[in-house]
Image: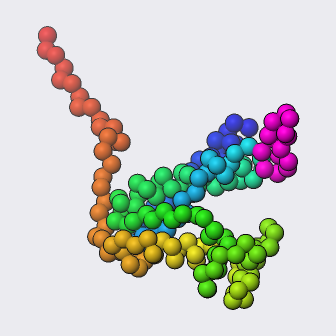
Amino acid sequence: MGKLRARQANRRQDFTHKLTTDLAKNHGWIGIEDLRVKNMTASAKGTVENPGKNVRAKAGLNRSILDNTPGGRRRQLAYKAPLYGSELRAVPPFHTSQTCAACGRVDPASRKGCGRLFACVHCGHEDDADHNASVETEARARRTGGTVTNSTRSVPRTRVPATGRRRMRETPKPAHAG
C-alpha cells in the first residue's frame, strides 16, 4: 500500500512540474486566483456541543482539493515564471464565480446551487461556471497589469543553470609513493 501511495504522489508531482514548466515557458504571464488553501480545507467536524454537518463530504472535498495541489502549483509557478521570463499575477478570488464575464455584474443569484451552469440574471449570459470564472480571473489578471500586455513573451527567455544540484565526481587522489 505504501508503494502505491508513493507512486501516486510521484505521478502527481511529475504532472505538476510538467504543467508549471510548460506554463512558465510558453506564456508571458500567468494569472491565478490567490486562494487560501488552508482556509478552504479546514475541518468541518465542529465541537462536542456543536457538531459539524456533512463531515464525510467535507473530508472528501478536502482530499480532492489537496490532491490537486494548488499550493504546490503556485509555489512552483512563483519560482519558474521569473526563471523562464514570464510573470505570475495572483488576483483576489472574491466573487470570481459570481461575476458575469460578459457584463461584469456580481450577483449570487447567477449561480443556482452547486450546478455547473452560470446564468447571469442581468444580461442573460450563460456559460459553464468554471469557464466563466476563468475568464473573469484572466480579466482581473490583465487589469492587474505589469510589463506584459498579452500572452506573448516580451522578456527574452533566460535559463539559469541549477547550482549545487549535481554532484561532481571527485578527482582521483594520487597514489602515494613509498
Residue at image coords 68%, 72%: 98
Residue 88 placed where, x, y %?
Answer: 43, 63
Instruction: Indicate yes or no whether the magenta region holds residue 133.
Output: no
Residue at image coords 36%, 71%: 146
Residue at image coords 85%, 48%: 53
- Which is nearer the eye, 21 or 54? 54
Q: Is residue 100 left or right of residue 143?
A: right
Q: Would you identify the image quadrant in which residue 100 lies?
A: bottom right
Residue 89 placed where, x, y %?
Answer: 45, 65
In the rendered image, the quadrant that contains the N terminus is top right
Q: Is residue 123 left or right of residue 164?
A: right
Q: With respect to residue 98, does 70 lie above or below?
A: above
Q: Would you identify the image quadrant in which residue 130 lies?
A: bottom right
- The answer to whether residue 124 of the structure is visible from this angle is yes
In the rendered image, the quadrant that contains the C terminus is top left
Residue 175 placed where, x, y %?
Answer: 19, 20
Q: Is residue 84 left or right of residue 102?
A: left
Residue at image coords 52%, 77%: 139
- Which is nearer the eye, 160 or 28? 28
